[in-house]
């Protein structure tokens, strides 16, 4: 998180019930002009499987994703995607800046990397439980104005959405 401008350490996190509604939300963000460098998604796209089903090499060409191909393939066209193991959650697919942050912070940190974006520590288990329930998180970080705009966009179809704005 050291490379995030202090003015952009705010976030909006939306929880979606399935990959279809999460993809609709990502498309809405993209159409509204959000920079892919400020958007991430996390989900358990390898549900009940013991093997990783896909990868994204350098560039935007996706590897094999099994039954999740259309979803993760669509995301990989806009966001860098990777699969990782999060303790207590299992295999997740993460796309965007959060994927690099989770790996960079060490997988033991889990979603604790969100604390650097204004999310209170006591709310991290809420998002971990959402992932365990096979839901999807769409996370946007940026200035207070950007995350408030994202909050408005992400309300459509989400189970919950919350903006975290760090006082200046």
Image: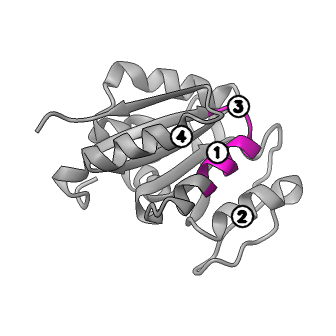
- Looking at the image, is mark 2 or mark 4 nearer the viewer? 4
- Looking at the image, is mark 3 or mark 4 nearer the viewer? 4
Q: 58 left or right of 140?
A: right
Mark 1 vs 3: CB contact within 8 A: no
Which residue is at the front of the view, 33 or 101? 33
Q: Earlier in the sequence, mark 1 or mark 3?
A: 3
Say whether residue 41 is magenta: no
Residue drawn at 58 percent across, 23 percent down: 129
Cα distance between the residues tagged 2 and 4 = 18 Å
Picture coordinates of residue 136, whole percent (x, y): 63, 38
Task: Count neighbours of disc 1 (C-alpha within 10 A) and say few if under 14, some if 14 to 19, many if 20 or more.
Answer: many
Cα distance between the residues tagged 1 and 3 = 15 Å
Q: Which mark is residue 154?
A: 4
- Looking at the image, is mark 1 or mark 3 nearer the viewer? 3
Q: Earlier in the sequence, mark 4 or mark 1?
A: 1
Depicted 118 relative to depicted 85: above or below = above
Residue drawn at 45 percent across, 52 percent down: 98
Q: Earlier in the sequence, mark 2 or mark 1?
A: 2
- Secondary element at image label 1: strand
Task: Count neighbours of disc 2 (C-alpha within 10 A) and say few if under 14, some if 14 to 19, many if 20 or more.
Answer: some
Q: 168 left or right of 143?
A: left
Which segment did they paint magenta? 16-27
Q: Note whether residue 14 is visible.
A: yes
Cα distance between the residues tagged 2 and 1 = 17 Å
Q: Which residue is mark 1?
A: 92
State the predominant SS element of the stretch in magenta.
helix
Mark 2 vs 1: CB contact within 8 A: no
Q: Which residue is mark 3?
A: 17
Q: Which residue is mark 2?
A: 74
- Secondary element at image label 2: helix
Picture coordinates of residue 84, whole percent (x, y): 60, 50
Task: Count neighbours of disc 3 (C-alpha within 10 A) and say few if under 14, some if 14 to 19, many if 20 or more.
Answer: some
């Amino acid at each position: 998180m050291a490379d995030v401008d202090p003015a952009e350490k705010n976030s909006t996190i939306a929880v979606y019930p399935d990959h279809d509604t999460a993809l609709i939300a990502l498309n809405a963000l993209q159409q509204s002009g959000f920079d892919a460098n400020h958007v991430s998604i996390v989900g358990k796209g390898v549900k009940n499987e013991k093997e990783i089903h896909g990868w994204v090499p350098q560039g935007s060409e996706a590897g094999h994703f099994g039954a999740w191909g259309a979803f993760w393939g669509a995301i990989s066209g806009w966001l860098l995607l990777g699969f990782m193991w999060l303790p207590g959650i299992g295999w997740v697919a993460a796309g965007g800046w959060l994927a690099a942050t989770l790996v960079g912070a060490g997988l033991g940190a889990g979603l604790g990397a969100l604390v650097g974006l204004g999310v209170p520590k006591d709310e991290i288990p809420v998002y971990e439980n959402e992932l365990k329930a096979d839901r999807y998180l769409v996370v946007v970080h940026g200035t207070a104005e950007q995350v408030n705009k994202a909050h408005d966009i992400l309300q459509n179809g989400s189970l919950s959405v919350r903006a975290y704005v760090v006082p200046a």
